[in-house]
Image (cartoon, helix red, strand yellow):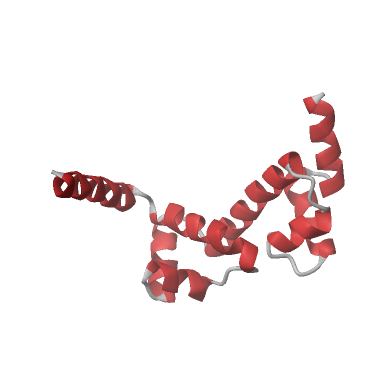
Amino acid sequence: MLLALNEQAIRSYLGKIERMRFADRILEQIRKTLPEGEPRLGDIAIRLGVSQRTLQRKLSHEQQSFQGLLDLARRQQAEDLLQHSTLPIVEIGYRLGFSDPSNFCRASNRWFGCSPSSLRERCRLMAT
């Protein structure tokens, strides 16, 4: 009986993975590896068990790019960390894979139209 339940759970999980868009699987891997530094296309391809060319081809088929997904993952995590943590802004930038705080500030201006500290302050004011 336990074996049957395990097999059912495994089939359900594998079915869910198969239905996921390839870009979503890549985005998930990018999010997992961001704290270790900037993820590289080759590293993500290895994690997914495909070649770099196959990864690029599948992304192209879904009208996505690796750099676009990396940017999306960074933006989402930056917004979450700036709103819900007290980590220093420099630390958040490093956790997102930026090697220089000024690069993180430029990205923040592009994503949110303001600096990371301004976004954090705006979120604090909205919460009160």
Residue at screen point 60% across, 52% down: 72
On the image, the x and y values in percent for residue 118 come to: 86, 42
Q: Quadrant of the N terminus?
A: top left
- In this rendering, the count of numbered labels is 0
In the rendered structure, the answer to whether residue 54 lies left or right of residue 94 reads: left
Residue 128 seen: yes
On the image, the x and y values in percent for residue 52 come to: 44, 75
On the image, the x and y values in percent for residue 51 come to: 39, 76
Residue 115 seen: no
Q: Which of the pair 102/54 is nearer the observer? A: 102
Q: Which of the pair 109/61 is nearer the observer? A: 109
In the rendered structure, the answer to whether residue 28 lies left or right of residue 70 reads: left
In the rendered structure, the answer to whether residue 74 lies left or right of residue 45 reads: right
Q: Is residue 80 above or below residue 50?
A: above
Residue at screen point 43% across, 69% down: 47
Q: Is residue 121 above or below residue 70?
A: above
Examine the image and state in which quarter residue 123 appears.
top right
Q: Quadrant of the C terminus?
A: top right
Q: Which residue in the rendered view is the most extreme toward the front?
A: 2
In the rendered structure, the answer to whether residue 93 lies left or right of residue 67 reads: right
Residue at screen point 83% across, 45% down: 114
On the image, the x and y values in percent for residue 107 come to: 75, 56
Residue at screen point 39% across, 59% down: 61
Q: Which of the pair 5/69 is nearer the observer? A: 5
